[in-house]
Image (tube, rainbow, N blue to C red):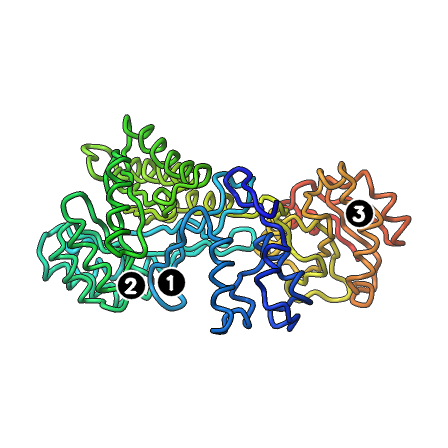
Amino acid sequence: MAEKKKGGLKELSPITIYKSLPKINCKECGVDNCMAFATKIVNREVELDSCKPLLKPENAKSYAILKELLKPAVKEVIVGIGDKAKKIGGKLVMYRHEFTYKNPTAIAIDVTDEMPEQEIVTRVQKTENFTFEYIGNTLKLDMVAVRCTSEDPEKFKAAVKKVSETTKLPMILCTLNPAIAEVGLMAAPKARPLLYAANATNWKDMAELAMMYDCPLVASSPNDLTTLVSIAKTLMVYGVKDIVLDPGTFINEGLPDTINNFTMLRRAATKGGDELAGLPLLGVPMVAWMDKGDTADDLIKWREAYVASMLIVRYADVLIMHGNDGWALLPTTVLRQNIYTDPRKPVAVAPGLKVYGTPDENSPVMFTTNFALTYYTVASDIESNKLNAYLIVVETEGSAIDSGVAGRKLTAERVADAIKASGIESKVKHRKLIIPGKASRISGEIEELSGWKVLVGPRDSSEIPKYLIEKWQP
């Protein structure tokens, strides 16, 4: 059998893909031959469009066949234009251990048309400038949601125009009034924003706008999945190409319903093959601000953050948030990064020699493993203390120090090989290697195999500066 389903994911044979490829082995895709390319396609390691001959008009039928075979359980929708455009959806499976999630949840920070112009600009710039380096990845925010709270078309138009002039980040235009939505779209006619939202009463007018301006449209029916799916079906039949589902976001006693609704939709898409449920999901954690009463702002920000985090874990493809403090957004963006890593591969960095500051022939030489979290922690402690040093990153297949030693991924042989491969012997005149305290049990073997004198360093890299001051002598 060429194709079957396992856990909702089509299991495709490379030969099934190969049959529809040009079979000319041109190598334009960067792979040696078409069969190897087909294997990478099955493993989702390359994009179909990497095959340039397949994009030619004469291969249109084959391209369409392959697109259908490779179609994800959750449709991919693009919001925005240019290099800032954001892809949402496109999920293949329900659980990340089945296959890597793609297109990390897009996070939008809101502005309203009743905010002063300078406040709008400040919030947009803060959204665009939010960055945090986390184990080799730069965490960022993705969109700006422009909300109409005034019910004044001119104010909404001015707000949309100001946001579009301030940033190229994709926008979400939020209003249930089609007339106001149209004014907002006219203010940025080619921006391809996400239009929020079509419901049971305004769907036709919103559908007309979505098709006229070629923008994706949110179908909304809070806590009523039957109506939500019905609206989505109606929009599809009417001609709307890109649809996002909003099943409603509720906090406090409504939170279980929220999580259940998101879960049921994603299960129906990935396990049941339901095309109407197989659309990106939108959550609105900012509802935490809607009825705050006397609750302190900091508590509301945490509440919004934990709702956002729960929705990321439970399949939300885009979120609208209000709080923009880094301390509240950081745990959410870190969680998102962790959820969207490849569970089949350890989070690792490239092995080799790293140079910090301006080391000379008498500078200390240390080593660590290529497990990303270990490496970036050590590197941060070296850099923040402005040390001049060499660091050899040893290939351990993504294992940390203690687990690497225990699992024989970090061995004296690998350390000795790494020393020779790094070229460090031509850079320093001494032969002293500081090893992590957690690797002390293999210190003798390292000395014997490498010929270097081994100094057992601290167990925690934060103590490296103190250790060097007290004990390092070339």
- Relative image position of residue 176 (x, y in whole percent): 16, 49
CB under 8 Å between discs 3 and 1: no
CB under 8 Å between discs 2 and 1: yes
Q: Amino acid at mark 1?
A: Ala
Q: Nearer the viewer, residue 204 or 132?
A: 204
* Picture residue at 73% right of the left edge, 66% below the top: 360
Please give the label number shown on residue 6: none
Marks 2 and 1, Cα distance to the nearest angstrom? 9 Å
Q: Nearer the viewer, residue 160 or 463?
A: 160
Secondary element at image label 1: loop
Please give the label number shown on residue 192: 2
Q: Name the front one of labels 3 and 2.
A: 2
Please give the label number shown on residue 455: 3
Please give the label number shown on residue 85: 1
Say which quarter of the image contains residue 140: bottom left
Secondary element at image label 2: loop
Number of residues whose C-alpha sits closer than 10 Å to that of mark 1, classed few (under 14), some (14–19) or many (20 or more): some
- Looking at the rendered structure, the number of numbered marks drawn on it comes to 3
